[in-house]
Amino acid sequence: MSRSDGGQFNCPLDLNYRVNLLVPTGEDYMKNVIKMFGYLETIIKVTIACIALVMFVLVFLNVVLRYLFSSGITWSSEVARYLLIWLIFLGAVLAFKENAHLNVDVLFKKFNQKTKKVVYILSSFLMLFVILMIFDGSLKTAITNINSYSPAAGVPMWIVHSAGVAGSLGMGTLILYNLYKILIKKEDLDKVIARDLSDD
């Protein structure tokens, strides 16, 4: 690199090296994605624990008030039901991440590795289609009920219906990531199925 007076600038770093410092490589990008998944998993676990605790307190307190004082919290059962909806969808995301959903794999285990891969990819795209329908339905319902509130607690109903949006986004992202590992990174199918994201 020359100056206007004919001298030379001292360039301590190669241009390509400096570009690599600024622009992450594909491997670095995926490490960041995996780290983000780890953070999201922690957030989901904490949220599930908080939801379960609030549900327990509400139901227990309502039972105590009903049987000991002949009174109760009128909105407790309603809020507990709505929290249960969120608990189910967030728990489904965690179960999907850990491959803990019930599945019948008696026939699948008898396939050779190539057939297993084809069947897994086809089933993944089928699950994506179903999850897309859940996402679309939940989103439309949330938008439709954006000005609606529950009768007892006054909870905005779009928050309740957003549980389906959050759950479908989480499971859809995990399916796409597993497909990426199989189709792009060419990882072994058995390891992809059995391994958690945190083990990468």
Image: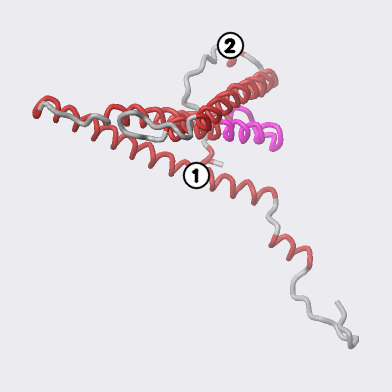
> The magenta stretch spans which residues?
172-192
Q: Is residue 13 above or below residue 61?
A: below
Residue at image x 65%, y 31%?
179
In the rendered view, does 92 fall on the left or right side of 71?
right
Q: Position of residue 80 (x, y in %)?
A: 31, 30
Q: Nearer the viewer, residue 93 or 136?
A: 136
Q: How many marks?
A: 2
- Which element carries disc 1, helix, strand or loop? helix
Q: Nearer the viewer, residue 4 or 65?
A: 65
Q: Nearer the viewer, residue 70 or 60?
A: 70
- Main SS type for the magenta part? helix
Q: Quadrant of residue 108?
A: top right
Outermost residue toward the right?
Answer: 6
Q: Which residue is mark 1?
A: 38
Outermost residue toward the left?
Answer: 68
In the rendered view, does 59 fall on the left or right side of 93?
left
Checking the image for residue 107, the label placed there is 2
